[in-house]
Amino acid sequence: MDNPPLSTPQAKKITAAYFSPTGTSKRIARAIAGAMAAALNMETADFPLTLPSDRKKPLPDFGGGGALVLALPVYAGRVPAIAEPIIKKLSGRGAPVVAAAVYGNRDYDDALLEMSDILSARGFQVAAAGAFIGEHSLSKKVGGGRPDAGDLKAAENFGKAAAEKIANNSFGNFEIKGKRPYRERPAAAPCAPKTDENCAECMICAQNCPAGVISFENPREISEGCLRCCACVKGCPSGSKFFDDEIYAKFKAFLEANCTARKEPELFY
Ligand SMILES: Cc1cc2nc3c(=O)[nH]c(=O)nc-3n(C[C@H](O)[C@H](O)[C@H](O)COP(=O)(O)O)c2cc1C
Ligand code: SF4
Ligand code: SF4
């Protein structure tokens, strides 16, 4: 695939980029970027990568200055496979970056290290990296309501600390939790949400599906490639979308039995 064209330079801007089907990574990206922009006297710019149409837009050009904040959810301890190709097309040209992995209170495993490796390889200088907690895509009982006020405050303080490093041009080496080679991604098991009889055919789910697999003609029709991201489940106004397959039920039960003890953000810089 050809590289998308570069847009206008992001001079004097802190770009908050995120792939965020259920919105938690977006909130963390914005909190970090807002604090950085205030500390560095810059503007913020949003750069969503969630929808297929977002991922076709011209990518920001960091050649003229500015910095990137990139927040991604953790999928199976890794960078989401669907987000990897677009992240690998970003071009840092020496610009600073702050990486945030947002995970559902189980573990972030190798995802933050993987993000940092990809961004370094793309020419960014990693100023700071942080793992934050977001409500689990599959269960409201696991990390429910997060990021909460405390998480957002931690993200802001982290943004301030990163801004200080950027202002002082100090990008010293620091260790990020994780292992290489990264955890293997599990083989993709085909899945699709179901739709109940209360569906009003509002098409919100089709508009918000990051994989573009929900039919706009009939929102009950799901084509191949569902990520199980739960954007459609959590975003349906009538609660009509749901998963009830065995893999989903088992994993949800595992999470609710083992992953409810509160975890806190882990920051590296
Ligand atoms: C397919 C899939 C795999 C996931 N894997 C993990 C994981 O390995 N560890 C974890 O703690 N949370 C995991 N989660 C939960 C998400 O990382 C978490 O809910 C995150 O906050 C979602 O981000 P978003 O709101 O930006 O979509 C997974 C979610 C999905 C959909
Ligand atoms: S968001 Fe819910 S109500 Fe609207 S089309 Fe999708 S399933 Fe139906
Ligand atoms: S159909 Fe699958 S990929 Fe699309 S929003 Fe629903 S869970 Fe996510």
Image (cartoon, rainbow, N blue to C red):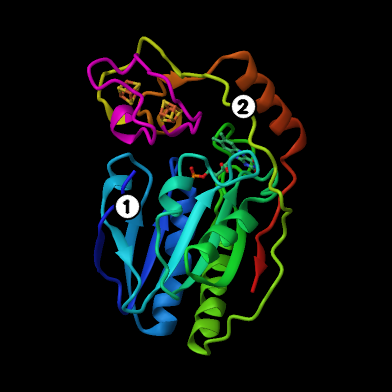
Q: Specify the segment rendered in magenta.
A: 205-231
Residue 6 position (above or below residue 63): above
* Disc 1 and disc 2 in contact, CB within 8 angstroms: no
**Is residue 37 a member of the stretch shown in magenta?**
no
Residue where numbered disc 2 is placed: 187
| Residue depicted at 36% across the width and 32% down the height | 209
Lateral position of residue 112 relative to residue 23, left or right: right
Q: Amino acid at mark 2?
A: Ala
The disc placed on residue 3 is: 1
Residue drawn at (33%, 46%) of the image: 55
| Quarter containing the N terminus | top left
* Quarter of the figure that contains the C terminus: bottom right
Ligand 2 found in image quarter: top left
Which one is nearer the viewer's eye here, 201 or 37? 37
**Residue at left offset 34%, top offset 57%:** 47
* Total residue callouts: 2
Question: Taking 157 as reference, is 8 left or right?
Answer: left
